Image (spheres, rainbow, N blue to C red):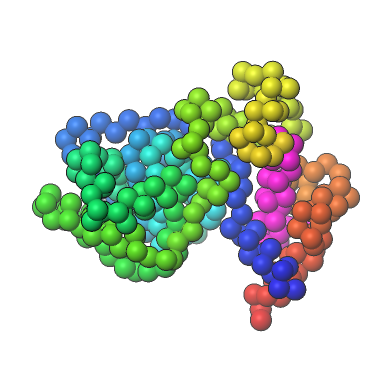
Amino acid sequence: MANIIQKIYLALQSQQYILYMKPAFESLSAFKLHSFLVRKFEEKSFSAPYHFHPEYELTFILSGSGKRYVGANMNDFYPGDFVLLGANLPHCWKTEQTMEQENSSSIVVQFKKEFLGTDFFSKPEMAGVLQLLQKSSNGIQFTGNAALYKKKMQQLYGEKNSCRKTILLLDLLHELSITKKYQLLEKQHNQTALSPAEQQRIHIAMAYIVEHFKSDISLTAAASAVNMAPQSFCKYFKKLTRKTFMEAVTDYRIDYAAQQLIHTSHSISQIGFDSGFNDISNFHKTFKTRMQLSPLSYRNTFLQKLNE
């Protein structure tokens, strides 16, 4: 039973391949006037597209909920969610649309590694912060001290004196460099090891999976999207992800189904169809093979654990 519960909780934090579109490059012209930016966003729903930029980014969610997309990772976000994203790591937040949904708001800090000089973070005193920035290439979610981080981010946003603002940012980075309460978001592979062209190709391939996982997936169409022959694409995809293309499709469908089983009251048949399985018996078989539980047992075990 312990192994079953562990699998369920791992599924809640599953690394789901999720890319809705070809990521857009964001050019932050305001950096011509400032060495780093601190901005507050308040809107009905977060609307920024899936994008990337060369700056590091700290984002703290003040209000709103939905899905957070970082590289190939998808997870829920709620007020108090706090992440550090490395340079050129694609990301976006999509607000969940409900009748009761409050406005979404966040505080965002963006800075370049050299914003205090090209070798500032290479100084011995900055070793901990440098390690933090290196880990952020995978995306980092900080899982504790939400009240403290909220206070520090609000102080950063409210501070008008540029010198004190810089000191506050360094203090926050130091705080994050010593905490043990965090998790990496992109555990599949380190994309900083990929060339820009490779990153772009794999993002487009993953985008195709998400756009079409509820219907028939065409290997030929996926290969065409990245301008490769199907056979070459298969080898290329497995080399970068350590999975075949169809294994990635199946993993995504099962991970999506697992979230639906936990977070909705939809029937198992409906979830199977919504997850891209045209044959419900095949859905049951595939789900049990991957999760070591039937869909019904998976849902019931999780609900039972919540009520203990």
| Residue at point 50%, 33% (across, down) | 194
Q: Main secondary structure of the magenta part?
A: helix
Q: Quadrant of residue 88?
A: top left
| Residue at point 86%, 52% (across, down) | 285
Residue 46 in view in this figure: no
Of 39 and 229, which appears nearest the observer?
229
| Residue at point 72%, 69% (across, down) | 3
Q: Quadrant of residue 129?
A: bottom left
Percent position (x, y) of residue 199? 51, 31
Percent position (x, y) of residue 190? 51, 42
Percent position (x, y) of residue 13? 58, 58
Percent position (x, y) of residue 162? 12, 49
Point out the stretch of residues depicted in magenta: 245-270
| Residue at point 47%, 28% (across, down) | 196
Image quarter where the C terminus lies is bottom right
Vertical placement of residue 133 versus 149, above or below: above
Left or right position of 85 against 255: left
Left or right position of 203 against 142: right
Residue 55 in view in this figure: yes
Vertical placement of residue 4 versus 227, above or below: below
Of 223 and 266, which appears nearest the observer?
223
Q: In the current view of this chain or complex, which residue is farthest to the bottom?
A: 308
Residue 269 within the magenta-colored segment of the rendering = yes
Q: Quadrant of residue 34?
A: top left
Left or right position of 267 against 104: right
